[in-house]
Amino acid sequence: MTLRSLLLIATMMLAIAPLSAHATGCREWNRMSESRKWDRIDRMIDDAISGQRGRSYQVNRNAIARCLADNSENMFWDFEDICSDPSTAQMSAIRSRFKNYIWTCVDG
Amino acid sequence: MNRILRALFRFCGGLLLALASACASHGPEIQTLGFLENYGQLSPGREGQASLIYIDGEADFSTYSAILIEPVVAWPGPDGQPAVATQELATNLDEDLRRELAREFDLVDQPGAGALQLRTALAFEADSHLVLEVELLDGVSGQRLVAAVDRRKLESVGSASQTDAWAVLIRNRLASFRQFDSAWRAREADAAP
């Protein structure tokens, strides 16, 4: 195996590793394909409405899910914008912005 | 084709955003009470949101199981005293918050690990608007996790419905944050090498 082959494999592994991670920061977001970005938004919406973490959690999940899904196009471009600007592309930017959507949708 | 449409959509979105920003810079400033520190950290909410909002993206709400609710502050008017209506509404909000948040958290009377600290102030303005300023802090470090300023028209003075609605909203939002952060943390754990 040549040095060039080893370097190629190492580069591929570095490129693939972040994509396999579930948590999403801007670094991962910017490396994703468009379809993976949409999948990630869908998964974040699932995370927000599935399960039963709290004691009561009597939030109207259907309404929140509908509201978040209605906003998915906005989220996509929102995440694109914050992650393309070095001044806003912190690790927590997507998580923070998504919580803004949750905050809004719970109000609805 | 799809990419071209998206690029066009994005361009138009950016244009609208720029126009909206230009308009916003000439719009009325959002009035605040002065109860919170560092309003510069807050940014205008979208339609339907609080007037100003800050959410710490690093905060993991799934790690909090208790909450210390500080007594709701009835914000004084120009004469330096809170109006009777403000005092009544603050008392209502205090009761509503304790009732609603007890359904999600253990109520504690001392800050500590795993506890949130809730600070709230309420003002009643002459034009029948209620202003709510709310801040959630980490119970140990005092670090700000959420801050919001909300201003809503009160349908009838003394009505408890607005304070009840705010208390339910705060509880539901925190419950949703806990749910989301719990799932996020589980995914991070799965993704760890």
Image: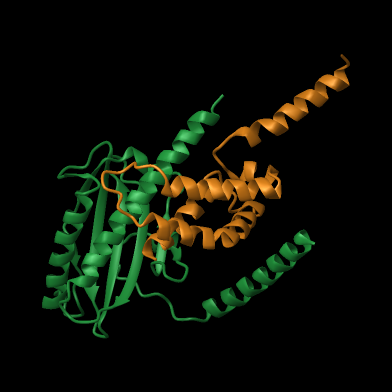
Chain colours: A orange, B green
Residue B115 located left or right of residue A26: left
Quadrant where the N terminus of chain B is found in the figure = bottom right
Identify the residue shown where x is 38% and y is 45%.
B179
Q: Quadrant of residue B182?
A: top left
Q: Which residue is the extreme one toward the front? A: A62
> In the rendered image of this protein, does residue B166 appear above or below residue B157?
above
B157 or B116, which is in the foreground? B157
B19 left or right, relative to B49: right
The residue at the point 14 percent across, 45 percent down is B109
Q: Residue reaching furthest top?
A: A1
The answer to whether residue B17 is above or below residue A26 is: below
Q: In the picture, residue B73 is in which quadrant?
A: bottom left
A30 relative to B88 in the view: left or right = right
Q: Residue at x 79, y 24 (%)?
A: A9
- From the top left corner, tell me how far across and down residue A57 is, in percent: 30, 49
Residue B83 visible at all? no
Q: In which quarter of the image is residue A1?
A: top right
Quarter of the figure that contains the C terminus of chain B: top right
Residue A81, how many percent across, how many down?
A: 63, 58
Residue lying at 48% horizontally and 47% vertically, measured from the top left: A46
